[in-house]
Amino acid sequence: MRRLVVVGASLAGLRAVESARRAGFGGTITLVGAEEHLPYDRPSLSKAFLDAGGPERVEPFKQERELREELGVELMLGARAEGLDTGAREVGVAGRPVPYDALVIATGTMPRSFPGADGIGGVHSLRTAEDAAAIRAALDAGARTVVIGAGFIGSEVASAARKRDLPVTIVEALDVPLTRSVGPEVGAACAELHRAAGTDLRLSTGVDEIESSDGRITGVRRHTARRRGRGDERRGRRAGRALPARRPDRGRGDHRPAAAHHEVPPPDREPRRLGRGARLRGRHRHRGGLR
Ligand SMILES: Cc1cc2nc3c(=O)[nH]c(=O)nc-3n(C[C@H](O)[C@H](O)[C@H](O)COP(=O)(O)OP(=O)(O)OC[C@H]3O[C@@H](n4cnc5c(N)ncnc54)[C@H](O)[C@@H]3O)c2cc1C
């Protein structure tokens, strides 16, 4: 085997490259990445990077020289792999075939999109350095923020807003946040921490649609879940209430409203396919409407 191609220039892709060299692979390695950046650390994006006066740029795990000279990697950055011919053993990258003997696909995950949010200013996902820079700019401008989802990343965005004393609401479908990751006790403790920090935490609440005016977000329309008897089963119920994502008392300056939503659908929570402005119906409506 002489040619290793790794698609996905982030943590997993980089580790694959390093492991191959450590194992004694002496052939060519091509690292293909859709982003323009060298592999960088995503976790910092929702932490120090969002602070006022935080770092200007995200530090790569390794500098380009180290990748090229020490690991002998040919870099193809800002280049999306668009096709795979397993018969010919070629990956199509930016219109040209890249041959391989071994291929590693390390393309990671993508944020779950919110129906109807495309093209609305002030609505952000958080996955890349550019996303984080856009959210920080919105916070710098004093955004009143609605965070959809009280998972780790949503919670960190809310904390970043509260650190700046900005108003923030988290809308979360579960009745205890982070239950699947840390269990109900720690999840409840996290909820208390949010409240103590001044975050408006709305549990058992989903978002039906994003409201906008002149192409910018003005709020989200939420609905609350109602218990059906004693069990844990819930039925979504439209409350028809809007949560503003704009600072109501501001008339001056560029106080951009923002809503952040993230990230990856866990396997049991695939997003529903909804059209623009679609209403969610039936049982578990509150779940499907969230992300
Ligand atoms: C804001 C944020 C905060 C996080 N905080 C933490 C934390 O505190 N602790 C923790 O453990 N984890 C955290 N994570 C998760 C962690 O960053 C991921 O687990 C990790 O990035 C996964 O690495 P990966 O290489 O598998 O995938 P990814 O980092 O998703 O990288 C995949 C790469 O593949 C590229 N790609 C996709 N398709 C193509 C294509 N067709 N052609 C070429 N390239 C392509 C993408 O552009 C991307 O650069 C966080 C994630 C985010 C977004």
Image (cartoon, rainbow, N blue to C red):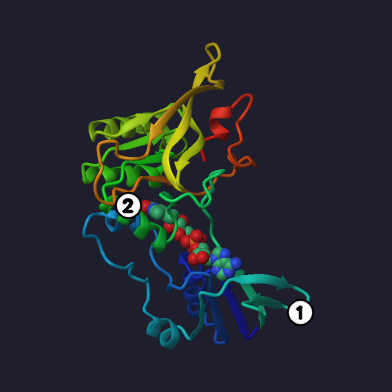
Q: What percent of the width, then of the height, locates residue 263?
A: 48, 49
Crowd band around label 2 with a 10 angstrom C-alpha radius: few (<14), some (14–19), many (20+): many
Where is residue 275, by image quadrant? top right
User: Which residue is rendered at x = 67% and y = 76% of the image?
Assistant: 92
Q: Position of residue 89 (x, y in %)?
A: 72, 78
User: Label 1 to label 2, Cα distance in Å?
Assistant: 47 Å
Mark 2 residue CB less than 8 A from any atom of ligand 1: no
User: What residue occupies the far top of the structure in this picture?
Assistant: 229
- Residue at 58% of width from left, 40% of height from top? 269
Label 1 CA crowd tier, 10 Å (few <14, some 14–19, many 20+): few
The amino acid at mark 2 is Ala
Rendered view: 205 above or below 255: above
Name the side, left or right, on which 215 lies relative to 244: right
Name the residue located 65 percent from the left edge and 70 percent from the top edge: 82
- In which quadrant is the N terminus drawn? bottom right
State the mark number for residue 138.
2
Residue 106 visible in rendering: no
Residue type pointed to by label 1: Ala
At mark 2, the secondary structure is: helix
Residue 66 placement, left or right of 85: left
Residue 125 marker: none
Q: Earlier in the sequence, mark 1 or mark 2?
A: 1
- State which quadrant residue 272 falls in: top right
Circle 1 is placed at which residue position? 88
